[in-house]
Image: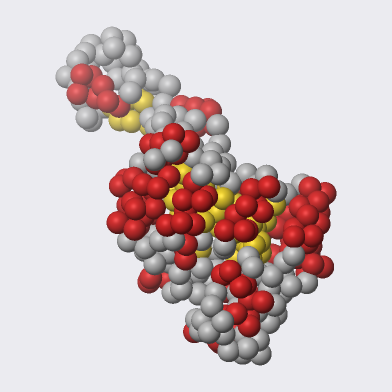
């Protein structure tokens, strides 16, 4: 049975506040084969203070949308009505809708929308009341851990583990992540994903902010059960996240590669597969006569050798054959019998 990695195509705020652009993003995610297309649900007034400064990458990518996070994000909100329209459109395109809540009201709203699980962003990992509110909804959670250390992850998991729904890390997936946009390769630290798996005995995945598709593919080979990746219709569009996002053709290449990796991982048993079995006798070798051998002649390294096919005596019987007498006459290339 092939393991199926859940792939979240992160549209985020790359709709730029335009519902038609959001629908085109849904089209692209569905065409690429993603399981979910994810947006972001927030009320700017509840998310950031009026004077919260932009991150460096936001300043670089949004120099025309004001000087604060508030100014930038206010233009990127999507209304409740738009959520309903996007959900309806996702159903038409046979892809699942998902969004990340960034405030309490948005948590309640997404719960009413009957999302499959809560995706917790890295910035909320240490937000105790936020995590507690989500835990009390008793939906599966996927938690990003950018900027976090193991103690902070443990503290967050403790909040969920208090409830039977999450006991022993049931219904929890933890994503390794680096919150730098884009993340340079030398700071990815992908092996930390397995550190999280070993430390907490939890399903793991990877939320990627690198340029390109190599790292998510590697993460699946290393055991990721969930992959999250930003995408856009055009990296040159204005907005904070477009430049570090995949374009539709890249998203499809990534997903196609991941699906191939899933097939390649297999069941872990080391045994001949169904196609190898037919090749096995053709490419392995048998003990055969190197020269003409008369009956009762002693078999030595001078008169026997190994050649294909592997339908006779195995070369692993070599030491048992050497020194014995030939039981009959053998011509060159005859299989040796004992």
Q: Quadrant of residue 81?
A: bottom right
Q: Quadrant of residue 311?
A: top left
Q: Nearer the viewer, residue 95 or 81?
A: 81
Q: Position of residue 12 (x, y in %)?
A: 64, 65
Compared with residue 320, is residue 182 higher up or lower down, i.e. above or below? below
Q: Position of residue 304 (x, y in %)?
A: 28, 27
Q: Is residue 303 left or right of residue 245?
A: left
Q: Nearer the viewer, residue 289 or 287?
A: 287
Q: Position of residue 317 (x, y in %)?
A: 26, 22
Q: Nearer the viewer, residue 278 or 217?
A: 217
Q: Quadrant of residue 76?
A: bottom right
Compared with residue 154, is residue 73 higher up or lower down, i.e. above or below? below
* Rendering colour mode: secondary structure
Residue at the image point whose x is 63% and y is 76% from the top: 73
Residue at the image point whose x is 79% and y is 67% from the top: 19
Compared with residue 301, is residue 217 higher up or lower down, i.e. above or below? below
């Amino acid at each position: 049975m092939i393991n199926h990695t859940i792939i979240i195509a992160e549209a985020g705020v790359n709709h730029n506040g335009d519902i038609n652009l959001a629908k085109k993003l849904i089209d692209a995610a569905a065409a690429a084969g993603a399981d979910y297309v994810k947006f972001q649900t927030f009320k700017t007034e509840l998310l950031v203070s009026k004077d919260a400064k932009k991150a460096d990458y936001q300043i670089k990518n949004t120099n025309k949308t004001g000087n604060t996070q508030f100014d930038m994000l206010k233009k990127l909100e999507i209304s409740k009505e738009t959520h309903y329209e996007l959900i309806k459109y996702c159903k038409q395109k046979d892809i699942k809708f998902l969004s990340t809540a960034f405030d309490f009201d948005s948590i309640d709203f997404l719960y009413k929308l009957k999302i499959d699980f809560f995706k917790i962003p890295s910035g909320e990992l240490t937000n105790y009341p936020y995590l507690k509110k989500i835990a009390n909804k008793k939906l599966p959670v996927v938690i990003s851990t950018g900027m976090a250390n193991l103690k902070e992850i443990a503290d967050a998991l403790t909040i969920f583990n208090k409830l039977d729904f999450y006991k022993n890390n049931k219904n929890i997936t933890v994503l390794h992540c680096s919150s730098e946009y884009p993340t340079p390769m030398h700071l990815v630290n992908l092996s930390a994903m397995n550190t999280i798996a070993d430390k907490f005995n939890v399903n793991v995945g990877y939320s990627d902010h690198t340029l390109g598709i190599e790292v998510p593919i590697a993460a699946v080979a290393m055991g990721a059960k969930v992959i999250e990746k930003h995408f856009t219709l055009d990296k040159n569009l204005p907005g904070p996240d477009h430049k570090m996002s995949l374009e539709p053709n890249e998203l499809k290449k990534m997903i196609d590669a991941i699906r191939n990796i899933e097939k390649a991982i297999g069941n872990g048993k080391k045994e001949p597969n169904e196609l190898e079995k037919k090749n096995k006798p053709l490419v392995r070798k048998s003990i055969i006569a190197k020269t003409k051998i008369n009956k009762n002649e002693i078999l030595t390294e001078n008169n026997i050798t190994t050649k294909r096919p592997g339908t006779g005596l195995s070369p692993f019987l070599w030491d048992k054959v050497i020194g014995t007498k030939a039981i009959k006459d053998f011509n060159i290339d005859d299989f040796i019998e004992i």
